[in-house]
Image (cartoon, helix red, strand yellow):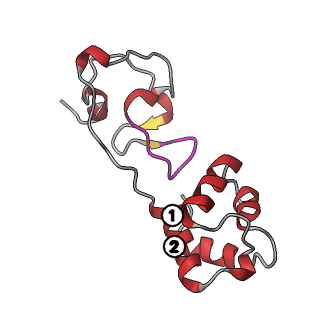
Amino acid sequence: NDPPELWEQRLTAGGSALVSTVLSRCGIRERLADALCEELGLERRKLSELKKGERQALVKALTAYELPYTGHEGYKKAEVTGGGVPLTQVDCRTMESKVLPGVHLCGEILDCFGRIGGVKFFLGGGS
């Protein structure tokens, strides 16, 4: 959730460390760091070796990575879950975590029960 400018600073100051190592030091899980590096063709590369465009692509991947939505498998494949983040820890107007400001939550991650299909996305909607 860090802004692109902060990632630019981190990646510019990384020196001879491997890209994946710097990402891990910044709180990115090792497997995710390795996967991002592989996707961008940066595996086993040092920060000092990155060209400006490669660094910009990495910053974009870290701050604005788009996960494609390919559809769903219908009601018969739907799952029911329980538990999750207590609603007392979420601002229901904005769906922002009260524990981790800047993190927004919705859906099955919340501790509530209801029908599937988007109902839980509207918990704080009023009516």
Relative vertical location of residue 95 with respect to residue 36 in this rendering, above or below: above
Give the quadrant of residue 81.
top left
Disc 1 marks a residue whose amino acid type is Ala
Q: Quadrant of the C terminus?
A: top left
Q: Main secondary structure of the magenta part?
A: loop
Residue on which the image places disc 1:
61
The label shown at residue 4 is none
> Residue at 60% of width from left, 59% of height from top?
38
Position of residue 42 measured from the top left corner of the image (x, y, whole percent): 64, 68
Left or right side of 70 for 34: right
Which region shows up in magenta? 97-106
**In this image, 9 relative to 96: left or right?**
right
Q: Is residue 100 magenta?
A: yes
Residue furthest out toward the right = 16
Badge 1 density bin: few <14, some 14–19, many ≥20, Cα 10 Å: some
Relative depth, front residue between 112 and 24: 24
Q: Secondary structure at mark 1?
A: helix
Residue pointed to by mark 2: 57
The kind of secondary structure element at disc 2 is: helix
Q: Which residue occupies the foreground of this view, 9 or 67?
A: 67
Residue 5, position as x, y percentages in the image? 56, 76
- Answer yes or no: do the residues labelled 1 and 2 have beta carbons within 8 Å? yes
Which residue shows up at 22% across the image and 33% down it? 126
